Image (cartoon, grey):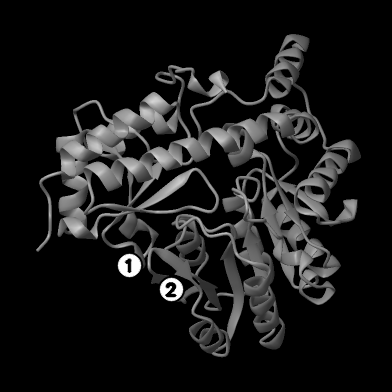
Amino acid sequence: MNFFQEYINRKNTYSVKWDKVAELYKSEKELLPMWVADMDFHPPEAVTKTIRERAEHGLYGYTYVDDRVKEAVRDWFSSRQNWTMELDWIQFSPGVVPSIAKSIQALTEPDDGILLQSPVYPPFFSMIKENDRRVVDSPLVEKNGRYEIDFQDLEEKMSQGVRMFLLCSPHNPVGRVWTKEELEKIASLCIRWDVILVTDEIHGDLVFEPNVQIPAASISPQISQQTITLAAPSKTFNLAGLQSSVLITENEEYRKKLEQIDKKNGAFTLNTFGILAMQAAYEEGEAWLEELLEYLQGNIRLVDSFLQAELPHVKAVQPEATYLVWIDCRGTGLSNAELSKALVEEGRIALNPGHTFGEAGDGFMRMNVACPRDTVKEGLNRLKKALKDKKGS
């Protein structure tokens, strides 16, 4: 566990999180970055060892992804999520966001409606808009600090000619792990209204007990034929910069159309280190992941207890998964702009503004707690400094 306590200086490493924060938040002050979703932890030693050995080999010519990598993916999902797949269901991509774009391009037409559930990961909105499709929003409903699906609204939106549903599972930023019953309802509606289900399951390994991650495609043979699952080792093992992810679908027609988009764009394969890191992580990273989950839960408990004691008008939505804490700041009475200004100028802390996740995120902030506990404590003290005197009527 001490492994995760180590402070690692990430400045001047081309880190988006640390080196771009002043520019993006328009601040001349030194900000504590607790925003973009990567971790301040080393990955499993098996990953580092594999990359080191390949780097020392010294030749970086063209590479390819072989069946051993696919087998590592298949075996990981079988073991961790009880999902059985065939090797030919698996395709590769630099990342989940490019995979969302590719799925939209391959399986929908301009001006098609694409459904999402806000507040949600901002690229869901941008990939729909950038590809000239229509955003159809069925907002989640907050009940006593927990988010639920409004199934009546969801079906109403699907019945209006939606072509695709982008499901975030587990949900970023609200941290929900969808239950089997919820996924069965989603599957039933997609089948009834002939809606393609594209499910972003990038946080699927970061689930806290007693919650269980259930891949949407595993719900039934029929929904498996209508689903594209997007996943990656990047969030799980902190490998985002290596740009390696998977698209998984049983539907052969979908696979052919996705491959055709790659051909049009000249996409070839993953980079050398991304291939090796994916394989090593899935083959040898499980013990590391179990320790990580325990450490993250400790950080999340710290956030909750601190807010209750020191900032009772600011509340944390308890995540069932992810290392992202969705913080309800509406009790401050501040507008989105005022809230962001207070955090940056008074607290000197960079969090993700909730409104960037859609209108349903107004008044919220997203905090990344995948960092040493001392960093979390420092972040909470900065949050207190910014918001302790900000209370709405």
Nearest to the observer: residue 37 or residue 1: 1
Residue that carries the numbered disc 1 in the rendered image = 359
Q: Residue at x 24, y 39 (%)?
A: 383
Looking at the image, residue 297 sits to the left or right of residue 54; the answer is: left
Can you see residue 323? yes
Q: Position of residue 30 (x, y in %)?
A: 24, 25
Left or right: residue 9 compared with residue 281: left
Q: Secondary structure at mark 2?
A: loop
Q: Is residue 374 above or below residue 187?
A: above
- Looking at numbered disc 2 in the image, what kind of residue is underneath it? Pro
Q: Nearer the viewer, residue 182 or 96?
A: 182
- Residue 48 or residue 267, whichever sits in front: 48
Left or right of residue 91, residue 322 in this image: left
> How far across and how far down the image is residue 131, in percent?
52, 65
Quick one: 149 or 100, which is closer to the camera? Answer: 149
Question: In which quadrant will I find the N terminus?
Answer: top right
Question: Which residue is labeled 2 in the image?
Answer: 139
- Could you say where residue 291 lies in the image, as x and y percent from the top left? 62, 31
| Residue type indicated by callout 1 | Glu
Q: Which residue shows up at 64% across the image and 62% down it?
A: 199
Q: Which mark is residue 168?
A: none
Location of residue 122 (image quadrant): bottom left
Q: Residue at 76% of width from left, 36% of height from top?
A: 282
Relative to 213, residue 160 above or below: below
